Image (tube, helix red, strand yellow):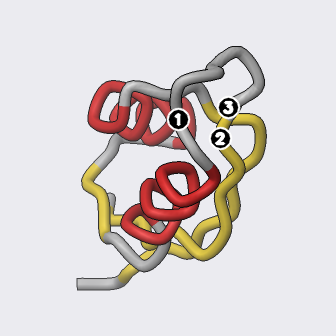
């Protein structure tokens, strides 16, 4: 299935090296992206692996082919 990210909040709490600019850039790059995943759990795993950050919350919509 295809998912388009509409809102996302990453768990940036443990990082002290990045600036707000870096956090905003990662978030902005992820929103609007279309991801292929089997289900919600797989979607979270795909995004986590691609960005290197855990996800606190996530909203998406299904993209019909």
How many numbered circles does the render carry?
A: 3
Q: Nearer the viewer, residue 13 or 3?
A: 13
Cβ–Cβ under 8 Å for marks 3 and 1: yes
The secondary structure type at the circle numbered 2 is: strand
Residue placed furthest toward the top: 14
Q: In which quarter of the image is the N terminus?
A: bottom left
Image coords of residue 31 (percent x, y): 49, 71
Cβ–Cβ under 8 Å for marks 3 and 2: yes
Image disc number at residue 18: 1
Which is in the foreground here, disc 3 or disc 2? 3
Q: How far apart are marks 3 and 1 (CA)?
A: 9 Å
* Mark 2 nearby-residue class (10 Å; few <14, some 14–19, many ≥20): some
Image coords of residue 13 (percent x, y): 77, 25
Residue identified by numbered label 3: 12
Relative placement, left or right, of 30 versus 6 is: left
Image coords of residue 24 (percent x, y): 56, 62
* For marks 3 and 1 on the same chain, the one whose residue lies earlier in the sequence: 3
Q: Which residue is drawn at 67% across and 31% down?
A: 12
Q: In this view, does 48 lie above or below 5?
A: above
Which is in the foreground here, disc 1 or disc 2? 1
Residue identified by numbered label 2: 10
Relative placement, left or right, of 62 versus 8 is: left
Quarter of the view holding residue 8:
bottom right
Q: Nearer the viewer, residue 57 or 10?
A: 10
The secondary structure type at the circle numbered 1 is: loop
Cβ–Cβ under 8 Å for marks 1 and 2: no
The secondary structure type at the circle numbered 3 is: loop
Image disc number at residue 57: none
């Amino acid at each position: 299935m295809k998912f388009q990210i509409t809102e996302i909040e990453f768990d940036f709490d443990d990082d002290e090296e990045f600036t707000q600019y870096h956090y905003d850039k990662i978030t902005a790059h992820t929103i609007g992206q279309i991801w292929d995943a089997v289900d919600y759990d797989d979607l979270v795993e795909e995004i986590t692996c691609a960005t290197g950050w855990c996800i606190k919350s996530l909203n998406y919509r299904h993209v019909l082919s």
